[in-house]
Image (spheres, grey):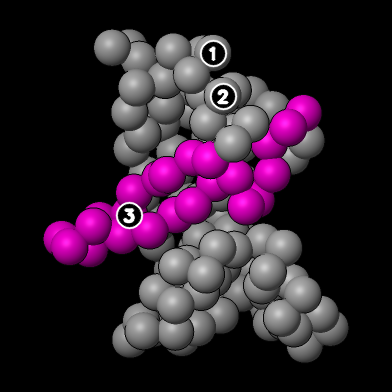
Amino acid sequence: MIVGLGIDLCGVERIRRMLADHGERFLKRTFTEAEVACARRRKKGFEETLAGRFAAKEAVMKALGTGWGRGVGFRGIEVLKRPSGKPCVVLHGTTAARAAALGVTAWHVTITHTEDLAIALAVAERG
């Protein structure tokens, strides 16, 4: 059963500006070390990959019904990839607690990119 659905669009230029203005501070406040390392290994551009991860995090927040806040933050949502290349979501701390309270047992996430935009869809499932 679907508990929540979220979608988000992120401009790659927005990520470029955040990196230019805030650099490592932006990376450390928004992404885990594993996410940054994965983005650096990607064939697509670093910024495009981060934009996709950012959109996925926002989509997860929307699926949880919280948006940003109420104990749900960017670092509490980790977007990694399986060996198949399919993205997966790992939740931490109060974000994981929020999902557990809703009965979420599985996540389905998809991310797509262009040179300018990234979009992500997240589905929270129970049972």
The disc labelled 1 sits on which kind of residue?
A: Ala
**Direction right: furthest residue:** 21
What residue sits right under mark 1 in the picture? 101
The disc labelled 2 sits on which kind of residue?
A: Ala
Element type at mark 2: helix
Q: Are marks 1 and 2 in contact (CB under 8 Å)?
A: yes
Q: Are marks 1 and 3 in contact (CB under 8 Å)?
A: no
Residue 23: image quadrant is bottom right
- Looking at the picture, how far across and down is residue 8, in whole percent? 58, 48
Q: Is residue 41 left or right of residue 92?
A: left
Name the residue located 56 percent from the left edge and 55 percent from the top edge.
55
- Looking at the picture, how far across and down is residue 64, in whole percent? 57, 26
Q: Give, as a single range, the part of the protein colored magenta.
A: 70-92
Element type at mark 1: helix
Structural crowding at the residue carrying mark 2, measured as other residues with C-alpha within 10 Å and reported as few (<14), some (14–19) or many (≥20): some
What residue sits right under mark 3 in the picture? 87
Structural crowding at the residue carrying mark 1, measured as other residues with C-alpha within 10 Å and reported as few (<14), some (14–19) or many (≥20): few
Q: Is residue 91 magenta?
A: yes
Name the residue located 56 percent from the left edge and 24 percent from the top edge.
97
What residue sits right under mark 2 in the picture? 97
Residue 80 appears in view: yes
Q: Earlier in the sequence, mark 3 or mark 2?
A: 3
Is residue 19 or residue 44 the one in the foreground?
A: 19
Residue 117 appears in view: no
Mark whose residue sits in front, 3 or 2: 2
Name the residue located 69 percent from the left edge and 27 percent from the top edge.
66
Q: Is residue 80 left or right of residue 57?
A: left
Structural crowding at the residue carrying mark 3, measured as other residues with C-alpha within 10 Å and reported as few (<14), some (14–19) or many (≥20): some
The disc labelled 3 sits on which kind of residue?
A: Pro
Name the residue located 44 percent from the left edge and 84 percent from the top edge.
40
Spatial CA span between label 1 and label 3? 23 Å
